[in-house]
Amino acid sequence: MPKRLLRRAFVLGAGLAGALTSAANAGEYNLTVDPVIVDTGTFKRTGIGYNGATPGPVLRFTEGEDVTINVVNNLDETTSIHWHGLILPFDQDGVPGISYPGIPPGETFTYRFPIVQNGTYWFHSHSGFQEPDGAYGSIVIEPKKREPFQYDKEYVVQLTDAHPHRGNRIMRNLKMMPDYYNRQQRTLFDFLKDAREKGVDTALADRAAWGDMRMMPTDIEDLQGFTPLINGKSTEQNWTGLFKPGERVRLRFINSSAMAYFDVRIPGLKMTVVQADGNNVLPVPVDEFRIAVAETYDVLVQPKEDQAYAIFAESMGRTASVRATLATSEGMVADAPELRKPSLLTMADMGMAHEGMDHGSMSMGGMSHTMPDGRAMQGMNHGAMNQGQTNHGTGQMSDTHKMPDGSSMKGMSHAGTDHSGGGGMPTMKHDGTAMAQEGHTMPDGSIMKGTSHGGMNHGAQGMMAEADSFYAPGSGLTPSAANGGKFLSYDDLRAQKPLYEYREATREVELRLTGNMERYIWSINGIKFADADPIRLKYGERVRFKFVNETMMTHPMHLHGMWSILDTGKGKWNPIKHVVSVAPGTTVFMETEVDAPGQWAFHCHLSYHADSGMFRKVVVEGGPKDKSAATTTNMKTGG
C-alpha cells in the first residue's frame, strides 16, 4: 500500500473514528471508507474498513426514524455500501450497476431512507472484493414497541473469515486451480483405509466416480486457510463480553464471511433462538446452530455461574475455528473445544439422491445423468438395479439404491401414480428442471400453475431431494450437535407474528443453482450473470421461487429489497428471512410479496460464486405512484 494511504488510515483510526461514529444531527450518521490494516494475530495485511477500522462501527437506528448517512470514500477506487436486509427504496440499496453507479474516489454519497423494521442486520461493500477485504459492519435497529422477550444486556457477535490473501488474488487462484485452497486432499493412505473398511472394489469405484466428476469428497469449502474472527478478533485475541451471574444476555450473531458457514455453540449454556434475519420467531432452545454466510440469528443465554464460557464457532468443513469468551471479569479465558472430525461428501450430497423421481414410464437403461460440472455420467442402468418391491397402495419403494461410496439413493417415490397401466406419464427431463408439460414453461423460467398430468402435481418434483431438514441428504453436510444435543433446523423456525396476509402464490419461478467446478464458473439455470436477462416481476404479485441445487456446494441465496418467506409448510407462520440457504442436492421453496418497485440484486452470497456468475438482476415493474409506499404495501406490522 502507498505510504500516503497508510498514513491516512492511521490518522483516521487514531483521531477521527470516535467522532465520525456519532451522529452529527438526530437521524444523521457519518461513515468513511478507509484503507486499514487487518491484524489477526497470526498475519497482517492491508484491507478496507469503515471509520478507520474493520469491522466498522455498530450503527444503531430506531424503527420509524428517517436516517441520513454521509459516506466519504477515502480509497483510490470506487466503493459502495449495501444495507443488508433493510427494506428501502431501490436507489438507496447500494449496488453499483443496479441501484446506482457507486461512490467514486474522494467523493461523498448521502443515503436517505426510512427505517421500517427492527432487528439485527449488517452493512458491507458491494464493490469487487472489498467486503472480504474487511469492508463490513453491523446494524442494530431498536423496535418501536416492546419486544416479546426480555434481556439485561446485549452484544453483537460478528463472524468473518479473514484470509491472508486479498480477494482479487483469491479469485485468480480459484480460476487457475479450483482446489487451490483445498488443504484436505485425499491421499493413498485414505484409499487404503477405505479399502479396508468398504472393500477394494467399492473403494476403487468410489475413487473412479469422484475422478470422473473431477471433484473430491472433501470439497465442502471452496476456501480454506482463513482465520475466523469474532468482532475482528481471533481466538488468541479473545473478544470478551461481560455478564453478571443470572443476567439474560442477548447475542446478535452475524455471519459476515466471504465463504465460510459456521456451526456455533456455547458449551455449558443452552441458547434460545428468538430472531432469524431480524424477524422474531417463536423461541427455540438449541445447543448448536449453523449460520449461513450473510444470515443473522439472535439468541438469549442466561449464564448463572461465575465462570468463563466459550462462544465457539467452527467452519462447516471443520478446517478452522474461533473462540470468544463470555465472562464475569476481564482477563478470563474460556477453554476452546477441539475441532471435530471433518465429514466427507457422499454421492447423495452430490445430487445423486433420486427422491421425487417418477420411473413409471421411463426407459432407464443406459440413461446418463448431468453432473454438477455440466458433464454427463453415462451408464447408470436402472434396469439392472435392484429397485425392490413397489407398494402400490402408497407408491413407495421399499429398497434404496447403493452408490459407489456406499451411500443410499432413498425415496424413489411413486406416490399418486397409477401403476396399473405401466405408462402414460409425460416425458421427464433429466437436467434437474421441473417436469412441466411441454409448452408450459414461460420465457422467464416461471411455470404456469394448475398444469395437471393425470392427477399428479409435478410442481414440487425434480431430480433433487426435497429439503425437509434444509440440510444435505447425505452424511457430508448433515450437522449433528455436540454430545447429541439439539441442532437448529429451518424446520424449527416459526414466525412469531405473520408479516403479510397469507395468500397463494400467483406463479412459480424456478432457479437451478448450477456450476462448473473445474472452470470455477457459477451460474443460475446454466447461465452466468453477464449473459442473463433480468428476472421480471410485477408489482403486487406473490411469486414462489423454486431453488434446485445441482451443485456440490451449499449456496446462501439473498434477494435484495424484499422479504423471503421460507416455505417450511407452516402457511402464514412460515419464517421471514433475507437469506435462504440451499444445501447440495436439495430443492427449497420461498415466496416473495413483490412490493418494492425498481431494480434489485438476487445472488449467492458466497463472494466468489456471485462474482463468477451466480447473480441476477430483478426488475419489479409497475407500482404505486408514490414509490416510497411500496415498502409497506400489503405488509402488516410484524416483528
Image (cartoon, rainbow, N blue to C red):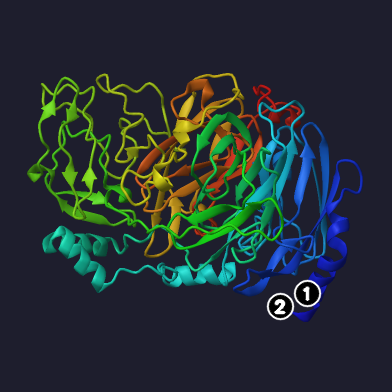
Residue that extends furthest to the right in the rendered view of this protein: 25
Residue 509 in sight in this render: no
Rounded to the nearest angstrom, the CA distance separating label 2 from label 1 is: 7 Å
Residue in the foreground of this view, choosing between 168 and 229: 229
Residue that extends furthest to the front in the rendered view of this protein: 306
- Three-letter code for the amino acid on which mark 1 is drawn: Leu
In the rendered image, residue 73, in percent from the top left (x then y), is placed at: 79, 61
Height in image: 564 above or below 255?
above
Height in image: 387 above or below 59?
above
Left or right: 101, with 22 as reference point: left
Residue in the foreground of this view, choosing between 411 and 189: 189
Q: Which mark is residue 1?
A: 2
- Three-letter code for the amino acid on which mark 2 is drawn: Met
For the residue labelled by badge 1, is the local secondary structure a helix, a strand or a loop? helix
Residue under the point 59% across and 25% down = 496
> How crowded is the residue under tag 1: few (<14 C-alpha within 10 Å), some, or many (20+)?
some
Height in image: 510 above or below 459?
below
> How crowded is the residue under tag 2: few (<14 C-alpha within 10 Å), some, or many (20+)?
few
Q: Quadrant of residue 272?
A: top right
Mark 1 lies on residue = 5
Residue under the point 37% across and 67% down = 184
Left or right: 375, with 331 as reference point: left
Residue 566 in sight in this render: yes
Please say if the residues under marks 2 and 1 sit with CB atoms less than 8 Å apart.
yes
Q: Quadrant of the C terminus?
A: top right
